[in-house]
Amino acid sequence: MWQKLKSSLFLQVVLALILGIIVGISFHDFSLALKPLGDGFISLIKMLIAPIVFCVVVLGLYGANDIKKMGKVGAKTILYFEIVTSIALVLGIVIAYVFKPGVGMNIDISKLDGKDLSVYTERAHTMGTGSDFLLHIIPKTFVDAFASGDILQVLLIAILFGIALLLIPKHLGDLVCQALEAFSEVFFKMMGLIIRLAPIGVLGSVAYTTAKFGVDSLLQLGYLVLLFYVTCILFVLIILGGILKFAGLNIFKFLNYFKEELSIVLGTASSDSVLPQIMKKLKNLGIKDSTVGLVIPTGYSFNLDGFSIYLTLGVIFIAQACNIDLSMHDLLAILLVSLVTSKGAHGIPGSALVILAATLSVIPSLPTIGLVLLLSVDWFIGIVRACTNLIGNCVATVAIAHWEKDIDHARARAVLDQKV
């Protein structure tokens, strides 16, 4: 048993998660002091995300050696993201109206204390317009994108760099790529060392969160949290499982393949913490580097399935809790606004509440202060939200690769069956 625990990162993380809950409940003040363990682990991971994404995307583009094909893959990727995100948003609305998680709460808006919301509403007001979002993708300098760690900025630079490599003499392009391959190998080796610290990071993060919010908040809004969990599970098994089946793969074997990454996300509530590992594992399934390098970084901003479900479910929950009737026009507005605001969630501190605040602010009949109702359970919802986002992007990569015939199906099935 000890040998199995020693060799299995998955078991170590699960044990750390359980210990974190026990410590958080039993030792309140001590647990609050453990926050730096979780923050430090995520910071170590984020330190390497930008250079790894840059190397993977550039090497993928250069290896594909076809600019026109990459443009076609990019267009199909955005189309896929919009379709699946729309399904997730509509699912959130349907579930909210069928199961009515907020009905009967009879919240008096005038008695809600909004002081804890100020930081989220301020960020929501500074998000800017669609043009501001597009301009933000362009970094001030080449180095600034890596310094800030903005994935979309790094992706833009990597795409331009990869295209430029294809346009210079081949012997020079080969030299640059050889150097990038060496750097990539070093970065992934560094990531392998850091990921061994995952149990410590998970223990600190879970203990701190349990001590800060306690189980009382979970019990008070348990129906909403449970409803969100079940909705995400159904979305993964039915919608994403159906997409995988179309590509010839099994959803349960697929989830088992990524169990270590999912356990880390479950403990840290951050899908950023495993981005490099999932890119490596997707390539191991027999998917071309160029497809993985394009779909995954883009998906982290444009394909947030779990967040999309929560966005519409949360907005309608607030309306129901405050006894506000929504017209068909309001629902359509929520859906259209959510399609836009859901694309800006990644990289914003407290992103879920910030985007919810931004969405509520453009629907006149909905009170932004209603977000107070969700503050105490945001972490509990966030862990499954992040896992669903992660699974959604992994499935998206397989779907696009299948669409473009950029996947070795025989190898993928062999890997998932643990025969390779």
Image (spheres, grey):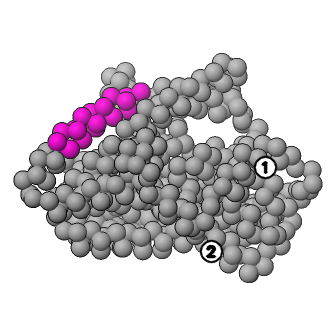
Pick the front one: 390 or 302: 302
Query: Would you say residue 63 sits in the magenta stretch?
Result: no
Please state which amino acid type lies under the numbered disc 2. Leu
Is disc 2 in contact with disc 1, using a CB cutoff of under 8 Å?
no
Q: Quadrant of the N terminus?
A: top left
Q: Is residue 195 above or below residue 115?
A: above
Which residue is drawn at the image coordinates 82% and 70% (left, top)? 365
Tell me the quarter of the picture where residue 402 sits. Answer: bottom left
Q: Is residue 221 visible?
A: no
SS label for mark 1: helix
- Image spot of residue 74 (x, y percent): 34, 69
Please state which amino acid type lies under the numbered disc 1. Val
- Image spot of residue 258 (x, y percent): 37, 47
Residue wearing tag 2: 336
**Residue at the left extreme, as displayed:** 171
Which residue is drawn at the image coordinates 8% and 57% (left, top)? 170
**Residue at the front extreme, as displayed:** 141
Over which residues does the magenta segment extend?
179-197
Residue wearing tag 1: 372
**Residue at the bottom extreme, as displayed:** 328
Query: How far apart are labels 2 and 1 at the CA level?
Result: 24 Å
